[in-house]
């Protein structure tokens, strides 16, 4: 008995003793430390305890526990996707909300987290999910239990009653049963829902400021919340140190959200001059999610979506082809986000070429997915570039993304928080 107690005590002591941090030396063919710079010649990146310790020219001797040979590749910061839905897959089966438990979202999310990180995306913003699913994934990837990116999670989106992100399409009693408790009416109640989201663990507040393309409604895509409700949401979130991201398609909904102080507009389909000027004046960022249209367009005419949704998809198709150029015409900042989950996860980098097609340079596109996206998250001193003290979120590709950003569609090496993703 005494021996068993002694072994138990020894095991507890071992478990409580921190393991020595492994030092890793990455031998890079070239290092593109920042989208604003140029690739270096051969260099060595030293990583310890999940952070970059140093970046030195050449491949000279360094004290390291392990070396990684990337001498034929360009090494750069991991990419950031500001709009993903890891816990869902593409499709029009809205009725699954009534048949699948939230826990299934964690299973699906674990699969998609791996696909996403293997594609070179080391940080994502999870833009609306089941009540606790994204929070469980966030913890799993942070602790290394699940291989995947760093997750900044919104949790359930705030919606008006019956709006996009609320439950629609079922019998009234089923809608009520499936309500997640995050719709609101009036400034006071909307402020309370922001506080509830913060209490439950949201890193960012997501709202559906207008109607949506994929919801089971044909009532248009204009503003849902009143200006007063949106201002209450923004002010309350900011008082709690949280930013607000707003799903918004219609121009007046975009304008009202920007004027209310909301931090980013997701989609922005019907952006016009007045809406763009409001965004510029208030520092509101556009996250265009061009891949969302690519994904849903691939499902047209195949029975994937209901007729009302197909009509809305066809209505927005012509507008997305000029969205980024329209925004930039008025000085609106564009940051990278794809709406992964509306299309198949792992294709996130295809958004880069779509942005370039609308007039952005390769350098601007890369910045939008690194330094620019990091700034939107308020994490510009931690991620988005390679420098001592920054998180070791590192990818490697064959080629120079500043010459052709599409080389990022095939990533050869990924490290997140100092962990190599196999």
Image (cartoon, rainbow, N blue to C red):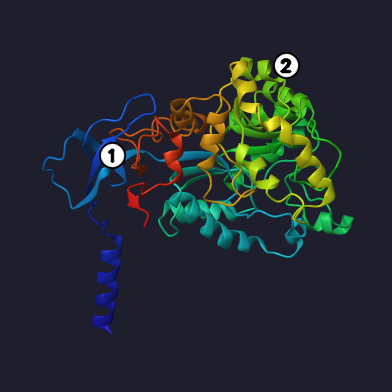
Q: Residue at x 45, y 53 (%)?
A: 148
Residue at x 30% of width, y 64% of height: 15
Q: Which mark is residue 75?
A: none
Q: Which residue is mark 1?
A: 52
Observer-nearest of 341 and 325? 325
User: Disc 2 to disc 1, how far (Cα)?
Assistant: 44 Å
**Quarter of the rendering containing residue 132:** bottom right
Check the image and report above or below for 372 versus 119.
above
User: Residue 155: image x %, image y %?
Assistant: 62, 47
Neighbour tally class for label 1: few under 14, some 14-19, many 20 plus, Cα within 10 Å: many
Tell me if residue 160 can be seen: no
Instruction: Name the residue located 74 percent from the left edge and 55 percent from the top edge.
Output: 304
Tell me if I can see residue 188 in this picture: yes
Determine whether 148 is above or below 319 in the image: below
Considering every residue shown, the one lying at the far bottom of the view is: 1
Q: Which mark is residue 274?
A: 2
**The image quarter in which residue 231 lies:** top right
Provide the secondary structure element on which disc 1 rests: strand
């Amino acid at each position: 008995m005494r021996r068993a107690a002694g072994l138990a005590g020894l095991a507890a002591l071992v478990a409580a003793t921190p393991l020595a941090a492994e030092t890793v030396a990455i031998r890079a063919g070239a290092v593109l430390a920042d989208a604003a710079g140029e690739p270096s010649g051969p260099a060595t990146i030293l990583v310890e305890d999940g952070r970059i310790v140093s970046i030195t020219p050449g491949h000279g001797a360094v004290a390291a526990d392990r070396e990684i040979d990337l001498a034929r590749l360009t090494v750069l910061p991991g990419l950031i996707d500001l709009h993903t839905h890891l816990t869902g897959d593409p499709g029009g089966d809205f009725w699954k909300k009534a048949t699948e438990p939230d826990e299934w979202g964690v299973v699906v999310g674990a699969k998609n987290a791996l696909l996403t990180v293997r594609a070179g995306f080391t940080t994502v913003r999870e833009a609306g999910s089941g009540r606790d699913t994204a929070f469980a994934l966030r913890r799993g990837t942070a602790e290394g239990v699940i291989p995947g990116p760093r997750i900044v999670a919104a949790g359930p989106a705030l919606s008006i009653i019956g709006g996009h992100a609320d439950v629609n399409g079922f019998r009234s009693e089923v809608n009520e049963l499936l309500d997640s408790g995050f719709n609101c009416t009036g400034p006071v109640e909307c402020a309370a829902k922001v506080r509830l989201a913060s209490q439950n663990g949201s890193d960012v507040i997501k709202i559906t400021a207008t109607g949506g393309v994929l919801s089971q409604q044909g009532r248009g895509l204009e503003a849902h919340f009143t200006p007063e409700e949106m201002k209450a949401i923004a002010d309350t979130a900011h008082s709690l140190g949280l930013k607000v991201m707003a799903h918004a398609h219609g121009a007046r909904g975009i304008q009202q959200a920007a004027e209310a102080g909301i931090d980013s507009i997701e989609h922005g389909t019907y952006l016009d001059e007045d809406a763009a000027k409001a965004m510029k004046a208030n520092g509101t960022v556009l996250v265009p999610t061009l891949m969302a249209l690519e994904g849903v367009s691939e499902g047209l005419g195949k029975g994937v979506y209901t007729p009302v949704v197909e009509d809305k998809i066809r209505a927005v198709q012509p507008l997305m082809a000029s969205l980024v150029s329209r925004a930039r015409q008025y000085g609106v900042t564009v940051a990278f986000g794809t709406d992964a989950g509306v299309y198949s996860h792992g294709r996130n980098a295809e958004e880069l070429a779509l942005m370039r097609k609308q007039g952005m340079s390769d350098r601007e596109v890369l910045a939008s997915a690194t330094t620019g996206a990091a700034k939107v998250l308020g994490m510009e001193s931690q991620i988005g570039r390679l420098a001592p003290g920054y998180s070791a979120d590192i990818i490697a590709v064959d080629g120079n993304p500043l010459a052709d950003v599409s080389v990022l569609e095939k990533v050869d090496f990924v490290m997140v928080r100092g962990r190599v993703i196999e």
